[in-house]
């Protein structure tokens, strides 16, 4: 209980549980939601760029993106310049889902029992920790 790793892990598990019913209403899993957040922020990224933003392996991202494509939320196409590069673009349905998902952050804020300012401070601390850890890899 005295380890930071346990606090991070258990909090992450509980955060995912809070998200679950909200995302089920949208037809998304938590990892799918994270990928959609990246695309809602900047559409037209490559699989590699999405993977980099999510700090995940592109190979593990591909099945997730295929599922989102089968749901009609995005379209994957090979780059004309380099066929190894796959571009990902939101469909109209994927763009429309952003409006439905806009209530999720407020629900998470309420569930946290924190103010926006406190969560922003926590986020900054976590990003700083993440950046420090990345330097050691």
Image: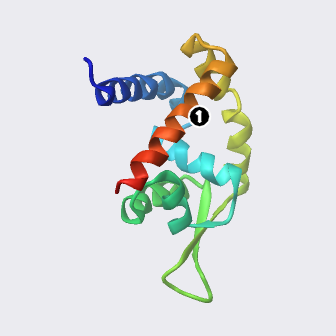
Frontmost residue, 61 versus 54:
54
Left or right, 16 with reference to 101: left
Name the residue: 54% across, 42% down.
Answer: 33
Image coordinates of residue 94 in percent, x first then y, are: 66, 50
Tell me which residue sits at (43%, 29%) in the image: 16
At a point 37% along the width and 28% down the height, the residue shown is 8
Q: Which of the two residues, 51 or 72, is positioned nearer the viewer here?
A: 51
* Left or right for 79, reference 7: right
Q: Secondary structure at mark 1?
A: helix
Q: Taking the image as drawn, is residue 39 in sight?
A: yes
User: Label 1: which residue?
Assistant: 124
Q: Is residue 130 left or right of residue 90?
A: left
* Quadrant of the drawing holding the N terminus: top left
Name the residue at the left extreme.
Answer: 1
- 73 above or below 16? below
Residue 88: give x, y in percent of width and height. Answer: 60, 65
- Structural crowding at the residue carrying mark 1, measured as other residues with C-alpha within 10 Å and reported as few (<14), some (14–19) or many (≥20): few
Residue in the picture at 50% in, 27% down: 19
Q: Quadrant of the C terminus?
A: bottom left
Question: Residue 133, relative to residue 119: is it above or below?
Answer: below
Left of 74 or right of it: where is 134?
left
x and y, in percent, of residue 72 in the image: 60, 55
Q: Is residue 25 visible?
A: no
For the residue pair 56 and 132, the one nearer the viewer reads as 132
């Amino acid at each position: 209980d005295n380890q930071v790793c346990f606090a991070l892990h258990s909090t992450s598990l509980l955060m995912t549980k809070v998200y679950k019913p909200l995302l089920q209403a949208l037809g998304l899993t938590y990892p799918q939601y994270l990928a959609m957040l990246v695309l809602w922020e900047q559409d037209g990224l490559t699989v590699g760029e999405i993977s980099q933003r999510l700090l995940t392996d592109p190979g593990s991202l591909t099945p997730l993106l295929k599922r989102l494509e089968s749901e009609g939320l995005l379209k994957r196409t090979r780059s004309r310049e380099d066929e190894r590069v796959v571009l990902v673009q939101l469909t109209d349905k994927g763009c429309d889902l952003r409006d439905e998902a806009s209530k999720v952050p407020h629900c998470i804020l309420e569930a946290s029992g924190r103010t926006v300012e406190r969560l922003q401070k926590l986020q900054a601390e976590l990003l700083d920790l993440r950046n420090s850890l990345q330097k050691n890899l």
